[in-house]
Image (cartoon, grey):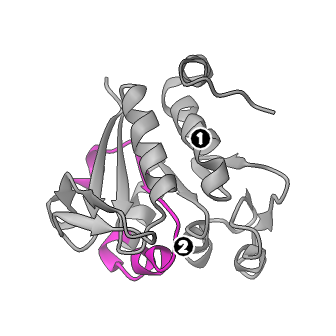
Amino acid sequence: MKKSAAVFFATGFEEVEALTVVDLLRRADIETVCVSIDNAKSVTGSHNITVEMNVGIDRLDFGMFDILICPGGMPGTKNLEACEWLIKNIRSSYQNGRYIAAICAAPSIFAHMGLLQGRRACIYPGMEDELYQNGASACCDSKVMKSGTIITSRGVGTAIPFALEIVAALLGQEKADELAKSIVYAEE
């Protein structure tokens, strides 16, 4: 069965983090949709790049996705967290054993929800207190951290390994390695 992912876009999202994930997941043949949390046809990021959406959140069947993904950016992260329908469905997806993922500032959303308590996670440098204050420990030396069905990462510079970890989680490490090779990505 084909795997599927939803990437959530809010005004002020970090473009590289969101679009790298969309691009690499689609290259891996994971059905990936761009979802506007305010049902707009397009959403503008934190660096004034506007992206066309596939669907608005009100028309989304959350149950059909293997993973829900939150890019970072400001005020994008705060806008995602303010979307009660998104938060409710992240919690439901997590409780039903499906993957959730966040990069940059967005892991703070999971921390505030209590989902990172007792877990190791990554977050944008300087935001570690968001994890500590909510019972998580920060992995400051890791680009990506997978803890059960939660995947977190640190920022723009870790967008490729973040996307590859998602591919590995959904399709296996061999597929992620093939994709990394095809895009000429080499770990240091």
- The span picked out in magenta is 61-86
- Asked if the stretch drawn in magenta spans residue 169, the answer is no
Above-or-below relation of 84 to 116: below
Instruction: Look at the image and tell me whether residue 98 can be seen.
Output: no
Above-or-below relation of 59 to 39: above
Q: Residue at x 18, y 69 (%)?
A: 39
Above-or-below relation of 40 to 168: below
Q: Residue at x 59, y 78 (%)?
A: 112
Q: Is residue 51 left or right of residue 114?
A: left
Q: Residue at x 35, y 69 (%)?
A: 86
Q: Mark 2 sits on what residue?
A: 109
Identify the image quadrant of the C terminus: top right
Snapshot quadrant of residue 124: bottom right
Label 2 packing within 10 angstroms: few (<14), some (14-19), many (20+)? many
Q: Residue furthest front?
A: 48
Instruction: Specify the amino acid type for callout 1.
Output: Ile
Q: Residue at x 58, y 35 (%)?
A: 164
Q: Position of residue 150 (x, y in %)?
A: 59, 52
Q: Is residue 69 left or right of residue 102?
A: left
Q: Kindly check if marks 2 and 1 are in contact, taking CB atoms under 8 A apart as contact.
A: no
Cα–Cα span, label 2 and label 1: 21 Å
Q: Position of residue 47 (x, y in %)?
A: 45, 69
Q: Is residue 102 left or right of residue 13?
A: right
Seen from the viewer's position, the closer of residues 52 and 177 is 52
Q: Residue furthest right?
A: 141
Instruction: Specify the amino acid type for callout 2.
Output: Ile
Identify the image quadrant of the N terminus: top left
Q: Which mark is residue 160?
A: 1
Q: Position of residue 122 (x, y in %)?
A: 71, 59
Q: Is residue 90 left or right of residue 53?
A: right
